[in-house]
Amino acid sequence: QVQVAESGGGLVHAGGSLTLSCVVSGNINVLGLSAVSWYRQAPGKERELVALIFGDGTTSYEEAARGRFTISRDKAKQTTYLQMNSLKPEDTAVYYCMVNSVLDFWGEGTLVTVSS
């Protein structure tokens, strides 16, 4: 059993910053972890990948996040972060953390609202 919990969302003005956290608990060390990803889903839109970090620390970003967002991981704390800078109103969405192991485990999401 693996649990995934996101936090750190909130309301921020355009140009501001937020850092999201994703804490993984449970049997992830037994199952093994391949990657942790951040997705987002804006109202009326499909869920989309934002950034991911592999077990070896390699990162990848989608175009909308590149240069503004940074994904990082603290293995000791089993926590993955998404630092978001220069936020835009179009970044408004529910942000989800997904842990890729033998199965994919999702959190409940955290809402980010960027006002203009």
Image (cartoon, rainbow, N blue to C red):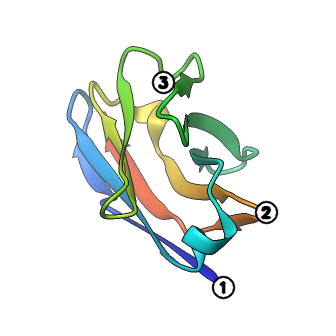
- Residue drawn at x 47%, y 33% is 57
Closer to the chain start, of discs 3 and 1, is 1
Q: Quadrant of the C terminus?
A: top left
The answer to whether residue 65 is above or below residue 74 is above
Crowd band around label 2 with a 10 angstrom C-alpha radius: few (<14), some (14–19), many (20+) = few
What is the CA distance from the residue labelled 2 to the residue labelled 3? 27 Å
Element carrying mark 1:
loop
Crowd band around label 3 with a 10 angstrom C-alpha radius: few (<14), some (14–19), many (20+) = some
What residue does disc 2 label? 102
What residue does disc 1 label? 1
| Disc 2 + disc 3, Cβ < 8 Å | no
Closer to the chain start, of discs 2 and 1, is 1
Residue 43 at x, y percent in the picture: 63, 51
Residue 100 at x, y percent in the picture: 69, 54
Q: How many marks?
A: 3
- Residue drawn at x 58%, y 16% is 63
Q: Is residue 76 left or right of residue 17?
A: right
- Residue drawn at x 62%, y 56% is 33
What residue does disc 3 label? 65
Q: Amino acid at mark 2?
A: Val
Q: Quadrant of residue 31?
A: bottom right
Closer to the chain start, of discs 2 and 3, is 3
**Nearer the camera: disc 3 or disc 1:** 1
> Extreme front residue here?
30
Along the line of sight, which residue is nearer the eye, 55 or 98? 55
Q: Quadrant of the N terminus?
A: bottom right
The answer to whether residue 30 is above or below residue 66 is below
Q: Amino acid at mark 1?
A: Gln
- Residue drawn at x 79%, y 65% is 103
Q: Amino acid at mark 3?
A: Ala
Residue 8 at x, y percent in the picture: 30, 60
Element carrying mark 3:
loop
